[in-house]
Amino acid sequence: MPKTQVPLPVRGIFHLLSDVPGTPHGLHLSHGVSFKFSNSSASETISISDNSTIEQPVSVVESAPTSVPNSSSRNTTSHENQVSNASPTLPRSTEWVQQNAQSEESPLALGSNDEQPHNLHIVGPAVTSDNQVLSDYLSSMPSASRGSRIIRPAIGNRSRPVLFTAVQKRPVGLDSNLSFAEERLQLIEKILEPFTSDLIDVYFHKTNSCFPLLDEGHFRKQYRENKSAISPALLSGLYAHSITFWNSSPILSRHRCPDGRFIWNLATEAAYSQIHRSPGISTIEALILNIGGREVTSLIGNGVLLASSVAMAHSLGLNHSPISWEIPQSEKNLRMKIWWALLIHDKWLSLSHGTPPLISPTLNDVPQPFVQDICGEGSSSEKALNASVYIALVRLTEVLDLHLRHVHQFSLSDETTDTTHLELALNNWIETLSDGIRRVVIRGNNLKIPGAANLRLSYLTVRLLLQRIELEAEKRVRDTGDSRLLNRYMQARRTAEDILILTQELQPEHLADCWLPSSAFAFSTTVSFLLRCALETENSTAGLVQSSSLKIASDLLSALREHKEKHAWDLGDICLAQHADVVEKLRAMTPPEDPSAEEVLDFSSFAMAESSYLDQLFPSLWDPLQNVW
């Protein structure tokens, strides 16, 4: 049994009350904790005997100071003589020591050791006699557990004994040894009880099936057998991420959904805490879940978490291909899945936020994913089809990276006007798709496949980006009225119309599917571009109000508003907040009754000026690429 020596002041003089018959000597707490005193040359110490390994300081209970006639003779009694006079019938672990009344207060009274599990609490005088009888009886039984101890007054003092009992210091269920991330997780689980397991099911059914990050079998086994070993930040992020799909679960939809924003804030606090305390692979997984969560409310916060994830991934060597490494295949798959997830979020957040990507294609050699890397050999055809959608998204992300590097380069040379390699890369990506996935991308069929609707929108977003790049390249060499320039406008507007048609045809099951949070910015960017097309191609108020670009923008906002009202779809919130009032004001413009009397307006001059026409009228508009052209 381990013993801890807790020093007490040398000035303290201890008395063994062995001369009082029947006095229980020693302090016993629950679970067999006992105290005994020993003497050393340097200081008086208390030895704590306990089966536990926690070292606890001990405070000494003092009796009230009293005036005793023969106190001088007691004060001159040596400590060794008092120990020798201890009752031989009592075990040494039960010897009770009382600090001398004349000594100063022990500095232990100022201690703040919260790990001490018990406190002494005085027992009322009405029941002291009853407890004293019981305590005296139990003192003759060495194996009996006594939770209270009586302190008798000094000899010759007529004050009555005082009884103390050991009480629990902390509230039941409160663990002072939890880390900050574990405390956040505990709060989340208390809010979600008893549906935490159902949310785990929702995550693997909705998110992990089309955006694979975790190994389901390994995670479920760990969750069932040793849940405490799972990273609290990872588990918090998983719960928060799954809240989005609460109403998609047959079980959860029958109950009130908790406040998702509050849970997200707790999960984010846990993630930041783990970045500081114990960053590792599980921390990167937690951050990926956080970055990929909905609703999107923190651009800067997501950028910070993404940068931290990429930095940790580089430090852990995740940018290296593990194919030839002598490690288990499961670890190889885990490392590659994390890297692919980081790659996707890095490129699409770069497009959404208007910032350069963090991951360089020349500084990693992780191979592109294959079906067996995602779902393993012998998997069902359904899992293989889901994996094919994800693989297509990863490869489309690499095509997007080419476009982003073209957009964010600083040097403007003749080579920057050549966009052939960008168009070729997108067409080659389409050619590599299987027949089923190609129909999803080109025609918008089979959107019931998990992740298919998001893949279709992602493709249209990249195509619109390509056409915007081509339009800017043409504008550098063509006049405003050139037919080839007008043709670029019409091609881009047709892609925006395809985005409108996709949005209008989304069914409830598609809306409840897994979407990248960057999709929210795809709608906002599309409407922004349509407004620009309307202003740059029309030269009159009547033409602006009746332009097809403005009508497409209005219809897209109406479709997003309908999805929001009927199905609480959040991906249109940013677009509605930024552009609904703008489009209404533009469409409400009244052209003059006599069109011939209207002065010809050149809206394109406003749009291309240093401070654009839209920025002057509507400074809250968001176009992440407005500063790169």
Image: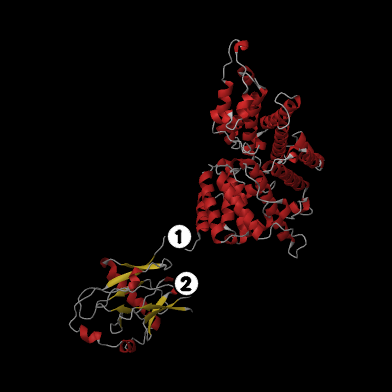
Q: Position of residue 196 (x, y in %)?
A: 57, 51
User: Residue drawn at (30%, 71%), measured in percent from left and top?
Assistant: 163
Distance in Å between CA atoms under marks 1 and 2? 17 Å
Badge 1: how crowded within 10 Å, few (<14), some, or many (20+)? Answer: few
Query: Which residue, as the protein is rendered here, is positioned at the far front?
Result: 413
Say which quarter of the image contains residue 111: bottom left
**Residue 531 against residue 118 in the figure, above or below:** above
User: Residue drawn at (21%, 74%), measured in percent from left and top?
Assistant: 159
Query: In this rendering, does residue 197 appear at all?
Result: no
For residue 210, side relative to residue 589 (left or right): right
Q: Position of residue 227 (x, y in %)?
A: 59, 59
In primary-sequence order, the first of circles 1 and 2 is 2
Residue 383: give its label: none
> Mark 1 near mark 2, Cβ–Cβ under 8 Å?
no
What secondary structure is marked by label 1? loop
Q: Position of residue 131 (x, y in %)?
A: 31, 71
Amino acid type, label 2: Ile
Q: Position of residue 373 (x, y in %)?
A: 76, 54
**Residue 504 against residue 380 in the figure, above or below:** above
Query: Which residue, as the protein is rendered here, is positioned at the far left?
Result: 69
Q: Which of 6 and 519 lies nearest the eye of the viewer? A: 519
Amino acid type, label 1: Leu
For residue 390, side relative to residue 600 (left or right): right
Residue matched to label 1 = 174
Residue 54: give its label: 2
**Residue 613 against residue 540 in the figure, above or below:** below
For residue 418, side relative to residue 216 (left or right): right
Q: Which of 345 and 513 lies nearest the eye of the viewer? A: 345
Badge 2: how crowded within 10 Å, few (<14), some, or many (20+)? Answer: few
User: Residue drawn at (42%, 67%), measured in percent from left and top?
Assistant: 117
